[in-house]
Amino acid sequence: MNAIQVLRKTIEFYRELGFEYLPLKSSALRNLAIGQTSESIPASVNPHQQVSEDTCSYQLNKEAVLDDLRNEIGDCRRCKLYKGRKNIVFGEGDPEADIMFIGEGPGRDEDLQARPFVGDAGKLLNNLILKLGLRRQDVYIANIVKCRPPNNRNPEEDEISICSPFVERQIAVIDPKVIVCLGKISAQVILRSKNAISKLRGNFFSYKHIPVMPTFHPAYLLRNPKDKWLTWEDMQKVLEKIK
Ligand code: SF4
């Protein structure tokens, strides 16, 4: 594959992931165009290591692409949630994770620490992950909106429609074996559904060919511990699916 083909492939690849521009420095682009590798070319677009001429498959460095996405989000003010946030909570975990957990939005602790699910609900989620025989760093955790809604209210429709393309792009990059939607908002947004979480949970659905298991939000389980066993049942099905 020559340099122009590599460049075209790179542009197509990033466009498919929703990027509006190629996240490369001009020097990196110049090197790419003349077919040279450089320290300044991100690993995600290293033409000599990432593009297979035989298969034309594009092996991506997911971590680098997620970094590019985080850079694109920047100091985001695209929706009104920026006004009350202290930090953007992008998401964290293994970019190669089999399981991706998606909640609805950061709470107070998450906003302060810029990390998803670190408060009491996060501890419950961590325990659940441990019971699955995994560690938190083995999965990926993100939210539908990346800034804390005031007083922990539900994110509103306009905020969801502006911010959710970011989590959709995270899904596209991570390409997990299973998505676990934590709570009503996450399940309704990912599945484009209006059904209650009590109707959705426990059944697999599909998001762009990725199996999706909706289950209760850990914050709900803190208030209703008697329903923990239902979430445990849901997670058993997830474990079966990733085997
Ligand atoms: S919630 Fe999303 S779209 Fe809104 S300001 Fe935060 S990062 Fe931007």
Image: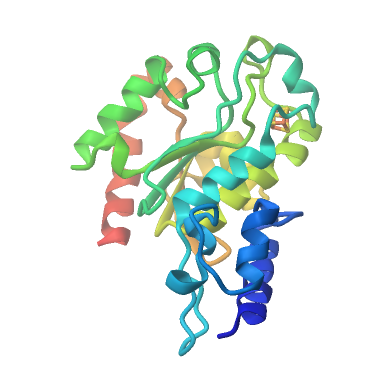
Instruction: Examine the rendered structure and indicate whether residue 42 appears above or below residue 48.
Output: above
Q: Quadrant of the C terminus?
A: bottom left
State ligand 1's quadrant: top right
Picture residue at 68% right of the left edge, 67% below the top: 11
| Residue 161 location, quadrant | top right
* 18 versus 124 height, above or below: below
Say which residue appears at 22% left-offset and 34% top-offset: 130
Q: Nearer the viewer, residue 131 or 108?
A: 108
Residue 143: where, in percent of width, then height? 55, 35
List x then y, in percent, for residue 90.
Answer: 55, 33
Which residue is depicted at the point 26% across and 28% down?
A: 127
**In the image, what residue occupies the spot 68% across and 75% down?**
8
Q: Report x, y in % for residue 66.
A: 53, 47
One can see residue 195 in this view: no
Q: Is residue 148 visible?
A: yes
The x, y position of residue 216, in whole percent, is: 45, 33
Depicted 212 relative to depicted 230: above or below = below
Viewer-nearest residue: 151 or 7: 7
